[in-house]
Image: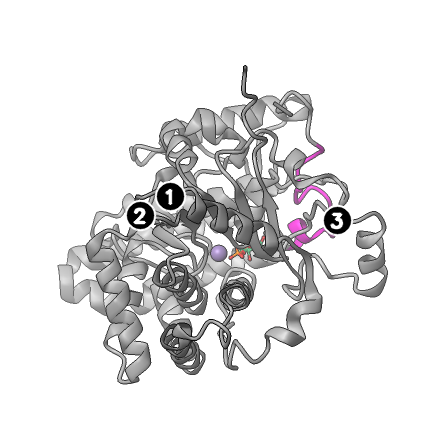
């Protein structure tokens, strides 16, 4: 196996002054913390209504933990072990030890000196700790308001997408008019560009989809730097062919990213592949705690389906009803393994979360949405752009997999020689602006068959 033995390049980090990582830790993360504090403060009366004085006390306590956290971050204090007693703290604290062993001159692990991926994940986990240590507000999702707003602000785009899906599914009886592959590519690309709508990059500012997503696809095509969609199609076709007399079609895992419009595009893609028989099962994976401002958790997932069902727009509501049915029948399912909210690169999954790894091994295709998943796939390292995607995965190969991502961090592998340099000269922000995207596929080598 090509392997973990080969040392990867250095981690992106705020220690490189002026880098995107540095600017994120210096500017964006404290801003996000300030907004979280403000949200708690604005909800004070709700906490009072629910829990009386104890609710107000809890709100104050959480705010004081969060202000302390913001101060630690801004003054580059050492990262502290977690203390809330949740089941994941051992994994977090061990990871901190591992980071410590990598520090030069025994310097402490700290916000501006340690890997960006680690400290950014850690901040979201510390936000959760502040809430869990303040019991009455422990279940409060500090990012819910933003996610709800972004869902409602994308209503127009949602309606046109749902209408389009219903038309395609109804018109399917005439395959000449609607070749399946062409339609699949459209829904895949809509889900790809849906990833532009995350709220972490904009520090919670509105980033919703306003225009009809299908109409813009042709113009956006040239911004897809790596397009391995043909490989995805081949995997789906192979799963159809190998079904024998049993139910055919692929088992697809979608590792979700953001709530709001991106989630709608993912549900529409999942609906399309199941309704057309390309897939027989879709397993969605989300986060078990509020994460990176807009990431989907179980509550967001169920809420989105309910809201879609309740729409007064006929086709949108029909989609919601169908999605609910798929969930009820078990054709769709939602999972939230705690590994998705740990700071590890995915190449650690097999040892850190063997149950999750082995469940992904039963998949025909794993789709990983978004930028953070790409950072974790590649370990958030300073790879040369021409390094093959498979090598940057360093042994993470549970099943054929594909990153569906708009670029919002300085990591991109698998490009042609000279492609990265050309982009840098034409468009210096190409890796962080969200303007470019990849549909990047990797398939594990076939098992050697001994004769
Ligand atoms: O995973 P997503 O939602 O596509 O992006 C999350 C993200 O915006 O958060 C970080 C900035 O804080 C960036 O690295 C990354 O692009
Ligand atoms: Mn996200």
Up-down relation of residue 384 to residue 101 (above or below)? below
* Marks 3 and 2, the one that precedes in the sequence: 2
Residue 110 magenta-highlighted: no
* Viewer-nearest residue: 207 or 98: 207
Q: Residue 239 appears in which quarter of the rendering?
A: top left
* Viewer-nearest residue: 239 or 430: 239
| Residues under numbered marks 2 and 1 in contact, where contact means CB atoms less than 8 Å apart | yes
Up-down relation of residue 66 to residue 6 (above or below)? below
Residue carrying label 3: 415
Q: Residue at x 34, y 51 (%)?
A: 280
Residue 6 coordinates in the image, percent (x, y) = 69, 23
Residue 158 coordinates in the image, percent (x, y) = 41, 77
Residue 407 coordinates in the image, percent (x, y) = 64, 57
Residue carrying label 1: 243
Q: Is mark 1 within 8 Å of ligand 1?
A: no
Residue carrying label 2: 247
SS at badge 2: loop
Residue 36 coordinates in the image, percent (x, y) = 41, 60
Q: Which span is picked out in magenta?
A: 9-23
């Amino acid at each position: 196996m090509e392997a973990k033995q080969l040392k990867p390049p250095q981690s992106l980090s705020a220690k490189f002054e002026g880098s995107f990582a540095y600017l994120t830790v210096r500017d964006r993360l404290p801003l996000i913390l300030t907004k979280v504090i403000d949200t708690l403060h604005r909800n004070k009366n709700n906490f009072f209504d629910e829990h009386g004085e104890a609710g107000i006390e809890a709100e104050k306590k959480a705010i004081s933990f969060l202000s302390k956290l913001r101060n630690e971050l801004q003054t580059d204090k050492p990262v502290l072990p977690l203390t809330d007693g949740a089941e994941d703290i051992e994994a977090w604290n061990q990871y901190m030890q591992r980071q410590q062993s990598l520090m030069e001159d025994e310097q402490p692990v700290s916000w501006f000196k340690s890997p960006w991926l680690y400290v950014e994940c850690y901040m979201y986990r510390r936000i959760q700790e502040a809430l869990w240590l303040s019991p009455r507000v422990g279940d409060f999702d500090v990012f819910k308001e933003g996610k709800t707003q972004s869902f409602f602000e994308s209503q127009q785009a949602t309606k046109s997408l749902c209408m389009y899906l219903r038309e395609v599914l109804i018109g399917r009886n005439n395959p000449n008019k609607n070749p399946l592959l062409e339609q699949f590519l459209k829904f895949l690309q809509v889900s790809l560009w849906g990833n532009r709508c995350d709220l972490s990059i904009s520090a919670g500012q509105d980033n919703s989809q306003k225009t009809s997503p299908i109409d813009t696809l042709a113009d956006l095509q040239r911004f897809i730097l790596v397009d391995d969609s043909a490989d995805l199609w081949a995997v789906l076709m192979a799963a159809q062919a190998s079904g024998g007399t049993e139910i055919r079609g692929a088992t697809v895992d979608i590792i979700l990213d953001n709530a709001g419009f991106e989630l709608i595009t993912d549900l529409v893609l999942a609906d399309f592949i199941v309704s057309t028989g390309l897939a027989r099962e879709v397993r969605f994976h989300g986060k078990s705690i509020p994460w990176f401002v807009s990431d989907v958790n179980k509550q967001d997932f169920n809420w989105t389906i309910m809201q879609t069902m309740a729409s007064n727009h006929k086709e949108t509501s029909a989609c919601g009803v169908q999605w609910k049915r798929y969930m009820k029948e078990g054709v769709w399912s939602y999972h939230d393994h705690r590994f998705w909210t740990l700071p590890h690169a995915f190449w650690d999954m097999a040892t850190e979360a063997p149950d999750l790894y082995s469940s992904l091994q039963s998949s025909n295709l794993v789709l990983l949405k978004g930028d953070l998943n790409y950072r974790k796939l590649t370990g958030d390292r300073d790879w040369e752009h021409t390094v093959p995607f498979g090598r940057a995965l360093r042994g993470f190969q549970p099943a054929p997999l594909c990153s569906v991502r708009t670029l919002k961090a300085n990591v991109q592998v698998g490009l042609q020689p000279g492609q990265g340099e050309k982009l840098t000269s034409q468009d210096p922000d190409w890796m962080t602006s969200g303007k470019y995207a990849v549909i990047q596929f990797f398939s594990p080598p076939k098992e050697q068959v001994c004769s």
